Amino acid sequence: MINLTYRFAQDSSSLELSGIPDVSNGDAEDTIGILSSWTLKIIGSPLLEGEKDHLDNLMDVILKYSRSYISGIRNTYISNKNIVTIKPFGLYHKLILNSTKEGVKPLEIVLDDSELADITRCLDLLRFDHRFNIKWNIKLDRPFSKRYININFKKSKKNLNFFYSLIFFLSTSALLTLLPINNKFEPIIENNASQDLSERLNN
Amino acid sequence: MDTNYLNTTGCNTFLNCKIATDATKKLDFLILVIETLQINATDSFLLQARNKGMSDDFLNRVNFWKLRTSNPLRKSYAFTSLSSEQIDSLVELISSMADGLYPLIRQLLSSKESKTLNKERWFLFSSRLKSLVRERMNLQRSYITSILDDENNEVIRELLVILSLSCGPGGANRLKASMYHQI
């Protein structure tokens, strides 16, 4: 049986997958139904490779991160069994890959926004490619709840103007209460003018 | 219409969801960024809409402009809101336009490019975008002043990131998901 290889390239990233059709599932000759290997090349980083589960984890974590990033939320996402992690790293994003082999140090790759977009695009191309009859363990992009967005939205982006104005109002009010007030002062109202006028009218 | 887009949005993913309050603002600003990157972008929008068989809202400049006046930050705010069909169509148009402009967007977002060249590109891009913002938006709104006064162009960068992640087969659905809230 012919081993099929398909490649998805996007500027800094190149994802290559090899496999064979699953004849028992009725796959066409050009369809990959059983994935035998995959490699992901990111320019300036070591070559990534692994089994289908690893690719599932990588796809899940990166697509979730991109989904939240498009809503302005930068959260850390960790895959099942802690194999793949992606988290914000200053202005960049850090991808951490833990090997399933013992004694191998985790691999850390720092991605900028353009590289994250490239990888996301590659993974999108793969998951919507009709030449693959593979069930990926990925949930569809769903809208977040308003509460989730409010909790997770970047703290720096929160509008603190209301909070500052409240503090300013309270501190000014507190200062004003300290001002001495003469409660015994009674204003003397002089009615001379009106009296003069009534006298004149009477005369 | 793009088949992938239909496949991903045709399910029940958007049931029990409502349009986000900032959706119209976000969409208008994304179109503004596209206009900054491409001269005569409105014509391309209308052409794409015609090719995709979209509704009358997208078939002439006036109707398209009317849609954009639903952005409350515009000088010419029309106190209208967009329907979910109009939002979905705009999302699809923005995604396909961003797809064509991806190399430019990528250049601006990349940290691996030459710093002086990148600085020049950012200067040209941000000054053109800011002039469009000054021309069309209500300058008394804090969001607008924050865009105009921000020397680090953080908001503009966020808009570019949104565009970069809206490209490709899954991009439209990702962008659409960000325009809604779950109830």
Image (cartoon, rainbow, N blue to C red):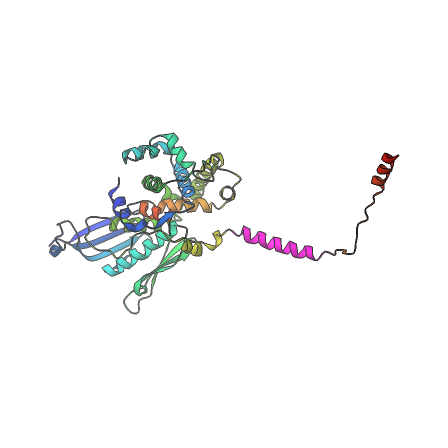
The reply to whether the magenta stretch includes residue B87 is no
Residue at 48% in and 37% down:
B137
Residue B100, x across and y down, in percent: 32, 39
Q: Is residue A196 above or below residue A107?
A: above
Residue A137: percent from the left, percent from the top?
A: 26, 57
The residue positioned farthest toward the bottom in the image shown: A102
Tell me residue B17's x, y (percent): 35, 49
Locate residue B78: give its quadrant.
top left
**Looking at the figure, which quarter contains the N terminus of chain B?**
top left
A168 part of magenta stretch: yes
Residue B140 visible:
yes
Tell me which residue sits at (41%, 51%) in the image.
A72
- Left or right side of B115 for B93: left
Between A163 and A58, which is closer to the camera in this rendering? A163
Q: Is residue B115 visible?
A: no
Overall secondary structure of the magenta stretch? helix
Task: Give the quadrant of residue B44.
Answer: top left
Which residues make up the magenta segment?
A159-179
Who is closer to the viewer here, B177 or B162? B177
- Considering every residue shown, the one lying at the far front of the view is A202
Number of numbered markers:
0
- Vertical side of B172 occupied by B134: above or below: above
- Where residue A65 sits in the image (x, y, percent)? 35, 54
